[in-house]
Amino acid sequence: MFVSKLLLRLFLLLPVTAALAQAPLIETAETVPAADQWLQPGDRLQVRLKGQPGATATFLGGKLMTEMPPTLTNGQLGIYQGTYVVQPGDTLPDRPIAFELLTPDSMLTVAFSQNKVRFLNQNAPQLAVTKGPLAYLNYGLGEDRLGGAKMGYLDSLVVLHITGKVGNQYRVRLAENQTAWVPENNVRFLPPGGFAPASLTGSWIVQGDSLYDYVRVPLTERLPYRSQVLTEPSRLVIDVFGATSNTNWITQRAGLQALGDVHYEQVQPDVFRLVLHLRHRQSWGYGIGYQNNVLTVRVKRPPAKMSLRGLTVAVDAGHGGPNTGAVGASGAREKDLTLAIAQRLQRALERKGARVLMTRDADVSVDNGDRILRLRQSNPDLLVSIHVNSSGNKAVRGTSTYYRYVAFRPLSTALYTEMLATGLPGFGNVGSFNFGLNGPTEYPNALVETAFVSNPEDERLLTSPDFQQQMAESMVRGLANFLRASRQPGLRGWLSRKPAEQ
C-alpha cells in the first residue's frame, strides 16, 4: 500500500529533481543481490546506494539508510546501506525500488534500482511443477564453474510451493524451516488458486522382480523428496516433504534380494522418512520416481558375479568437439587425452570380458545432460569418467579421484589406490564433488583426474602412449579390486592389494 503512494510522490518529484540537480548525486542504487527478487513476509530486502557523502538516504517510503564508515567500504565515501523486513500485508507487484538522497542544502535526487522486487501474498500460494527429465533442486544460491550445490534430481510433474525468487532461481518451501532452490527453466507455473502441496501416505508394497527390489508408497500428489545412502549400517534414507503418515501396514512380498528391513519415521509433521536397510554393505544404486502419484523406489541388486567378465562398465571421455577442456603448454588438449585414455580403457576392459558403454568414441560434442540420460537408459553397473586436471600453478601435479556420494567412495578409493601405483603423486580422493556425471544415484560412479596437463612433467606422461596404457590398466585393476572387496563382508579388504580377480 505505502509503496504505491511513495512511487506516485517520487514520480511527481522527478521534474523538480531534474531542475535542481546540476550533477548526479546518486551514482548507483541497487538491491543486494542485484537481481530480480520475490520476497515474502519475514524476508529481508537489502539495498545499497552510492552517492554524495553526508546526505540523508532513504528507500521504500522513507526507510532510512545508514552511511557506512570508510573502514567498512575500502575507503569509499558515500556508501549507504539499508534493510527492510517484509511485513504481512505489504504489497509490491514487480517494481523497481525507489531511492531518495537529500543533501544538507536540501537538494533532492531520486533513483530506481534496475532490478524489480515483488512482495508475495502468503494467502495465494505460488505453485509450480517440475519439467524435463533432469529437474533438480539446489541447496542454496552459491555458484562456481560446476554450478550450485545440488540437493538431488526430481521426477517430472513434482508440485513445488514457490516462496521467493532471486535472479533465475526460485525458492521452494520443502517443510517448516526447510527450503531449496530450483532453476526457473526446471519448472512450469500452475494457475492460481491451488493449495500448498501436502499428502497423507498410504500403506506400502515392498516386492522384487527378476531385476530390482521396489518400494511403493501411495500419495495424493507428487511431492518433492531428498535421498541419501548412509553406511554402517548400509541404508537408503528418503525424506518426502509435505507428507504425513497414514501408513497402517507395510506388505513385504517374495523376491526381495537387495532390501532388508524397511520402516518409516515422521521426523517432523511435514517430513515423512523412508528407511530402507540394504542387505549388502556396498550400494549398487537406486532410482526414485513416480508412477502416477505412487512414489516408487527402485533398488538395484549387486551383479550376479563380482568380476569384470559379464559386467557392464560405462566409460566417459570428458569434453569433446568444440569443448576442448584444459590445454597444456605444449598444446596437448584435454579432449584428445581423455578420449585416448578412455579408448585404451575400453579395450583393456573388453579383454577381461566386460561390456563397455562409451559416452563418446570420437571427437564430438556431447552435452553432460545427454550423457546422463543415455546412461540412465543403458543402466550400466559402474561408471568411470576420465578427465585431466589443470592449475594456474605449473608446479602442481598428481592424480586424483572424485565421488559425490559416500556410498560410492569405495569405488573412487580403489581407483585412486591403483592410479598412485603408476608413480604419479597423489593430489587426493575428493568427496561431495558437484559434477554432473557424479550426480546419478542409479549406479556407482567415480571421476578420475588422471594428471595435470598444466604441469610439464604430467603433460609429458599424459601424451605418452605407453603411460596412457599404464593408466588404463591401473583403472582396470582398481575396478577389479573394488569388485573383489564388494563381495566380502566388509569393504576395507581392497587395501591389501592382493591380486585382483579378472
Image (spheres, rainbow, N blue to C red):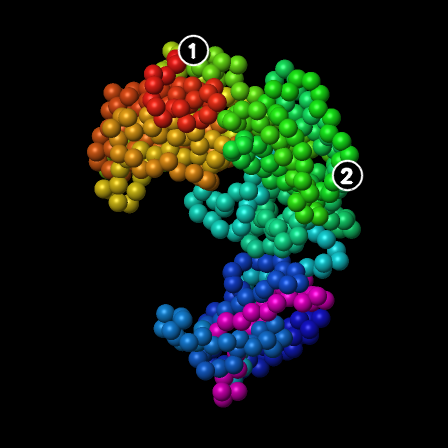
Secondary structure, magenta segment, majority class: strand
| Residue type at the position of mark 2 | Asn
Regarding residue 216, the answer to whether it shows in the image is yes
Q: Camera-side residue: 58 or 446?
A: 446
Residue 87: numbered disc:
none
Quarter occupied by residue 225? top right
Pinpoint residue 461: horizontal percent, then vertical percent.
Answer: 24, 28
The reply to whether residue 129 is in sight is no
- The label shown at residue 353 is 1
The vertical placement of 134 against 256, above or below, is below
What is the x, y in percent for residue 89?
A: 72, 67
Q: Residue 378, how many percent across, how many down?
A: 54, 21
Q: Is residue 403 above or below residue 34?
A: above
Closer to us: 69 or 4: 69
Badge 2 element:
loop
- Label whose residue precedes the other's in the sequence (1 or 2): 2
Between marks 1 and 2 in the image, the one whose residue lies nearer the viewer: 2
Which residue is labeled 2 in the image? 246
Instruction: Report the magenta residues as a range.
Output: 80-106
Is residue 410 shown left or right of residue 372? left
Residue 165 magenta-highlighted: no
Q: Residue at x 43, y 22 (%)?
A: 485
Instruction: Report the residue at 28% width, 45% height from top.
Output: 392
Question: In front: 427, or 155?
Answer: 427
Q: Local crowd at mark 1 within 10 Å, few (<14), some, or many (≥20)?
A: some
Q: Amino acid at mark 1?
A: Gly
Q: Which residue is rendered at x = 43% and y = 44% of the image?
A: 145
Assign the N terminus to one quadrant of the image: bottom right
Label 2 Cα crowd, 10 Å radius (few <14 / some 14-19 / many 20+): few
Q: Is residue 87 magenta?
A: yes
